[in-house]
Every structure is written in C-alpha cells, then in structure tokens.
Amino acid sequence: MAALPEDTGAKRALYLEDLSVGDRFQSGEHALDVAQIKAFASQFDPQPFHTDEEAAKNSFFGGLAASGWHTAALTMKLLVESGIPLAEGIIGSGGELQWPKPTRPGDVLHVVGEVLDITPSRSRPGRAMVTMRCRTLNQRGEVLQYFTPKLVVHARPA
C-alpha cells in the first residue's frame, strides 16, 4: 500500500490488510495554552513547574512546562480524532515514551506516525501487533515526544 496521505481529511477505517510497513500519517493540530497546562497538572501531576509560572522559572525547566503525561494524553487525542483511523480503535498493548523537550504554553502540537513492523498473531488469527513510531511535534518542528506504541490491529471481518 502506498503511504497514507498526510492530509487528515475524512479517512476510511483501516484494517490490518490496509496497513504496510512504511505507511505514514499526520494528525491535525492542538494549540496548548497556560490554562490547559495548569488544569491538567492540577488534577494529574501537581508539581510547581506545571502549575505555577513563578515557581517554574527557578526549576529544571526554566519556565512553565506541560506534564509529559499531558503531552501523552494530547498525543492520544490527536491519534484518535485525526491520526491513524483504525477500524476497531487504537488498542494499545504497550510501548515506550520519551520527552526530549518540554511542551510549553503556545505550542501547537501535531503527530507524525509511521508503521514500523507488523507481526501477525500466532494464537489469534485475524489480528496482529503493529509497532508504530509517533513523533509529537510543535509548530517549529521540534520533537516534544517520541511514542513507540504496540497496537492490536484486527483484520477485516469475513
């Protein structure tokens, strides 16, 4: 199959048969602001460098930074709403996260993904483990998060 279009208009639902190693996609965008960063952090990661602009200035980050878990949650939102349109949903089975740069207020995030590997299940015909490489980037093209999920992908029903 040729690469998936990086234009994320309405896409048809994809099944296992529709995917090939090297297929790429690009999500839509999400603009992040101070209020979103503080609201998420207040509920899920209440550390001063995520909740208090003054305290954040003297922290490791040198200013307010979104929680890595916030970046991960936004990545998932972008994948579900406008990323790879898997017919049975994006079902994770594990993966790895890295945050090489902090996500900041004013960043506009999007996700670029690529299919790295497809391993058919030996015990469950009709499904496979698909390994993706997803990069969450800001408006300057800086990678804020690397995500390498292993996804359970189903074949088209008979």
Image (cartoon, rainbow, N blue to C red):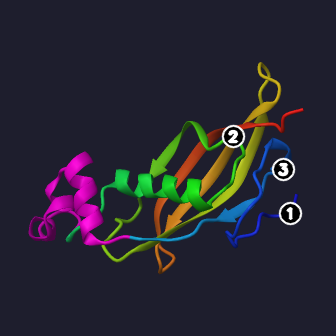
Is residue 45 visible in the rendered image? The answer is no
Which disc is residue 2 wearing? 1
Which amino acid type is shown beneath numbered disc 3?
Answer: Asp
Q: Position of residue 96 (x, y in %)?
A: 51, 44
Read off the magenta span: 32-61
State which quarter of the image contains the N terminus.
bottom right
Which amino acid type is shown beneath numbered disc 2?
Answer: Glu
Q: Position of residue 110 (x, y in %)?
A: 53, 68
Check residue 129 for magenta coloring: no
* Pointers 3 and 2 in contact (C-beta within 8 Å): no
> In this figure, which residue is indicated by the disc labeled 2?
88
Residue 65, above or below 155 = below
Residue 123, above or below 59 = above
In whole angstroms, how far apart are the C-alphas of marks 1 and 2? 21 Å
SS under mark 2: loop
Instruction: Name the main secondary structure of what is drawn in magenta.
Output: helix
Which amino acid type is shown beneath numbered disc 1?
Answer: Ala
